[in-house]
Image: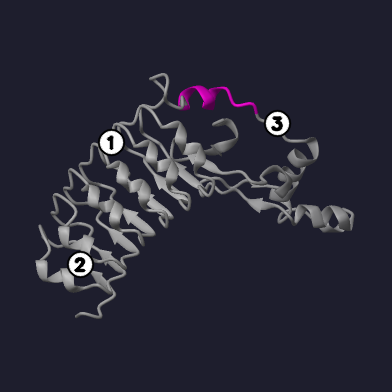
Amino acid sequence: MAHLRNLVARNNLLEELPKSMSSLENMEALYLSGNRFETVPPVVFSMYRLRVLHLGGNRIENVPYAIGSMLKLEILYLGGNLLRDVPATIGRLQRLSSLSLCDNQLETIPSTFGELRNLESLSLHNNVLRTLPTEIVKLRNLQQLSLRNNPLGKDLIPCIQVHHFVHNMQLEPPKLKELAGRVVRLKMSRLPIKEVLPRELIVYLNSANQCVNPKCKGVYFEACVEHVKFVDFCGKYRVPLLQFLW
């Protein structure tokens, strides 16, 4: 057991982990979702090589400050618990690329989230967040931020007013070529377009990309989406984030 690296114990009735598990120093991935934990099991903090920790769907009400000692964590899933806050020490997890805190009762998140420089995905939907710390703009590698079903935008400084900047976005409208290209590209499979269009235009149309929103069947062209990062407010649409957080 000392060399165990992955352990899956989902959907049981576990309320705690035995202290003997603290000897599992080689553990890299631990999946404990769907149990009855009320806090992060203390023995987890002895697993210094842990990269993946799933504790979703439990009864966790608080996350110990010791979470900040798990410096090799890359994926932390705490969705579906009873969290009202998370400790500021979570900002020490410099290797974290995915953090899920959805489906909790979070009212705020600490400003130290801005120190998670490698974070690519942050799920905060289905909480009671009213504000976001301005430090969130420091997350240069953030690709997806899910915020749907939160009462955001009702408080003022020092928050980012999500409601305000969503309704006041200054986005450059697509050019006529872009709009026409989207329409034509969607109909290419049904019309004999290749027989009537110049080769250069066919190449352009074939450069279209599928919309990042899985519920959208539209396409876009590369020129319109360079360096765009997305935020999900409603579960259906994604809009550029960092360009108007400043």
Amino acid beneath label 2: Ala
Quadrant of the snapshot with the C terminus: top right
Choose mark 1 or mark 2, whichever is in front: 1
Q: Choose top left, top right, bottom left or bottom right for residue 112.
A: top left
188 vs 9, left or right, is right
Q: The residue tagged with tag 2: helix, strand or loop?
A: loop
Residue 171 image point, x, y percent: 66, 30
Q: Residue at x 52, y 48 (%)?
A: 143
Label ID, residue 9:
2
Q: Which residue is mark 3?
A: 172
Q: Which residue is mark 1?
A: 106
What secondary structure do most residues of the magenta stretch adopt? helix
Residue 47 image point, x, y percent: 25, 66
Amino acid beneath label 3: Glu
Q: Residue at x 41, y 32 (%)?
A: 133
* Nearest to N terminus: mark 1 or mark 2: 2
113 vs 245, left or right, is left
Q: Residue at x 86, y 58 (%)?
A: 195
Q: The residue tagged with tag 1: helix, strand or loop?
A: loop
